[in-house]
Image: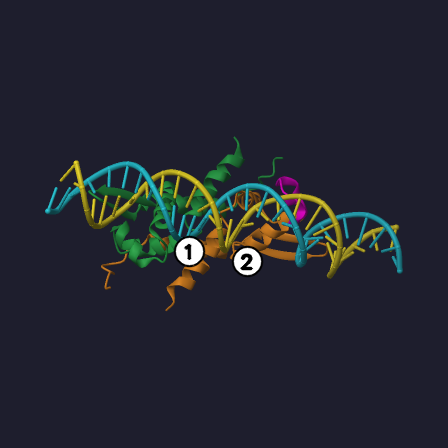
Chain colours: A orange, B green, C cyan, D yellow
Amino acid sequence: MDKDSKHSDNAKVFKAFCDETRLMVLSLLRSGEKCACILLRKVKVGQPTLSHHMQILVESGVVSARKEGKWTYYSISAAGFEHAAGLLREFAALTDGGGSS
Amino acid sequence: MDKDSKHSDNAKVFKAFCDETRLMVLSLLRSGEKCACILLRKVKVGQPTLSHHMQILVESGVVSARKEGKWTYYSISAAGFEHAAGLLREFAALTDGGGSS
DNA sequence: AAAACATATTGACATTTTTCGATTTTAGGC
DNA sequence: GCCTAAAATCGAAAAATGTCAATATGTTTT
């Protein structure tokens, strides 16, 4: 079981929370689904940059996207957060002896 | 209340989990306290690099360090993980209407 | 179909992060 | 004091990430 690639994947999930702008977006989404144009007015980055951040948030699973006409609506994904929380618990949980090497 | 600096601080906490090598270290620490020299044998980075990662882990609060003689022993900090988990919950929790802007 | 709008993509640049080699600091053994 | 070992610090190179300007794509309106 290649542990290394697993850690690489897990790091990707946590990277969603590593950037100040992304945390700002997540914070804004706490009050409900919003379209990119609304988010764009609140954060201090350009449109392409926001688009890039939203892509990272969606791919990490903590945000879901919904297209409707010209707009893309984003919202918090409860399942994505559960997954991240689960990983956190996993890393915090101590094993028994473990060191068989 | 300057939200921006708060997000900056929170991002710093999550950065502990953003790197593959750091996740590897956290994984190793699950089976108990270990000195840097042991960790060094398991991860595939040099000694100065490991030292740097350990500094980040300690400063983010998820790992605690204990010096004993020539050695430095590291272990998981339950409190640090609680804090990170709390932040995660905070971002996941929906507010009511919120938009008082 | 043309214009206007919302978002995505591309390409370049700047900043940040990771990494390493060399050196320094600190502690213990001779 | 001198030598060895463990870990930290310094300085620079390499890699990854964030940012923007320009352009492209898709959608609604006129």
Q: Position of residue D29 (x, y in %)?
A: 83, 51
Looking at the image, residue C6 sits to the left or right of residue A14; the answer is right
Question: Is B59 inside the magenta-drawn segment?
Answer: no
Q: Is residue B74 visible?
A: yes
Residue furthest to the top? B1
Q: Position of residue C28 (x, y in %)?
A: 15, 43
Q: Which mark is residue B20?
A: 1
For residue B11, above or below residue A74: above
Q: Is residue A90 visible?
A: no
**Residue type (three-letter) at the residue carrying disc 2:** Glu
Q: Position of residue B36 (x, y in %)?
A: 28, 50
Looking at the image, residue B62 sits to the left or right of residue A67; the answer is left
Q: Which mark is residue A59?
A: 2
**Crowd around label 2: few <14 · some 14–19 · many ≥20 (10 Å):** some
Q: Residue at position x 49%, y 39% from top?
A: B8
Residue furthest to the bottom? A1
Location of the C terminus of chain A (image quadrant): bottom left
User: How many numbered discs?
Assistant: 2
Chain that bears disc 2: A
Q: Nearer the viewer, mark 2 or mark 1?
A: 1
| In the foreground, C2 or A100 | A100
| In the foreground, A79 or A43 | A43
**Crowd around label 1: few <14 · some 14–19 · many ≥20 (10 Å):** some
Q: Residue at position x 72%, y 54% from top?
A: A70
Q: Secondary structure at mark 2?
A: helix
Q: CA distance from mark 2 to mark 1?
A: 18 Å
Q: Secondary structure at mark 1?
A: helix
The overriding secondary structure of the stretch rendered in magenta is helix
Q: From which residue to which does the magenta span run?
A: A37-48
**Residue type (three-letter) at the residue carrying disc 1:** Glu
Q: What is the quadrant of residue B82 in the picture?
A: top left
